[in-house]
Amino acid sequence: MLVLTKDNFEQEVLEAKGLVMVDFWMTTCRPCLAIMPEVEAFVERNEGKAKFCKIEVSENKRVAVTQKIFTVPSIVFYKNGQQVFVFNGQLIGELGMHGLQDKLDELAGA
């Protein structure tokens, strides 16, 4: 996964062509750390379907605010620079990785 910062977020996500998934997380967030192995395995299984990135929110607060991320973990899909779907902490719990897979497949046209 590509590690994003305030310095490369715009170029790597907002100016990107195609599908980008961004994992907004924090080092102090236990749910974020708990799902991290699942997210990493998900990324490995789906390599080539999208660009996969993560950004640590406490170190990049301005990015989180401009992207309207108010809860972590949040996994956001962007298509051609536009937010197209947000899995926040509640949705991640309800839908799990199967829901994330379904959404990726739908957005990637698989």
Image: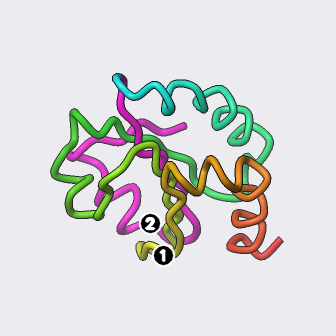
Q: Quadrant of the N terminus?
A: top right
Q: Secondary structure at mark 2?
A: loop
Task: Report the residue at 51% width, 52% height from top.
Answer: 75
Q: Give yes or no for residue 13 being in the magenta stretch.
A: yes
Task: Report the residue at 51% width, 75% height from top.
Answer: 84
Q: Residues within 10 Å of mark 1 (few under 14, many from 20)?
A: some
Q: Amino acid at mark 1?
A: Asn
Task: Report the residue at 63% width, 47% height from top.
Answer: 93
Of marks 2 and 1, which one's residue comes earlier in the chain? 2
Please state which of residues 70 and 79 is positioned toward the viewer in this rendering.
70
Q: Give yes or no for residue 21 being in the magenta stretch.
A: yes
Question: Picture quarter containing residue 102?
Answer: bottom right
Please state which of residues 73 and 103 is positioned toward the viewer in this rendering.
73
**Residue topped by disc 1:** 80
Tell me whether the residue at label 2 lies in contact with that at label 1, contact meaning CB atoms closer than 8 angstroms.
Answer: yes
Q: Residues within 10 Å of mark 2 (few under 14, many from 20)?
A: some
- Residue 49 pos. (x, y %): 72, 58
User: Residue 16 bears which disc, if any?
Assistant: 2
- 10 displayed left or right of 92: left
Structure colour scheme = rainbow
- Residue 19 pos. (x, y %): 58, 66
Give the answer, above or below, for where 21 lies relative to 41: below
Please state which of residues 24 and 96 is positioned toward the viewer in this rendering.
96
Please state which of residues 62 and 28 is positioned toward the viewer in this rendering.
28
Q: Residue furthest right?
A: 110
Task: Report the residue at 22% width, 41% height from top.
Answer: 60
Gap in Å between the C-alphas at discs 2 and 1? 6 Å
- Residue 4 pos. (x, y %): 36, 42
Question: Picture quarter containing residue 24?
Answer: top left
Q: Quadrant of the C terminus?
A: bottom right
Q: Secondary structure at mark 1?
A: loop
Magenta residues (range): 1-27
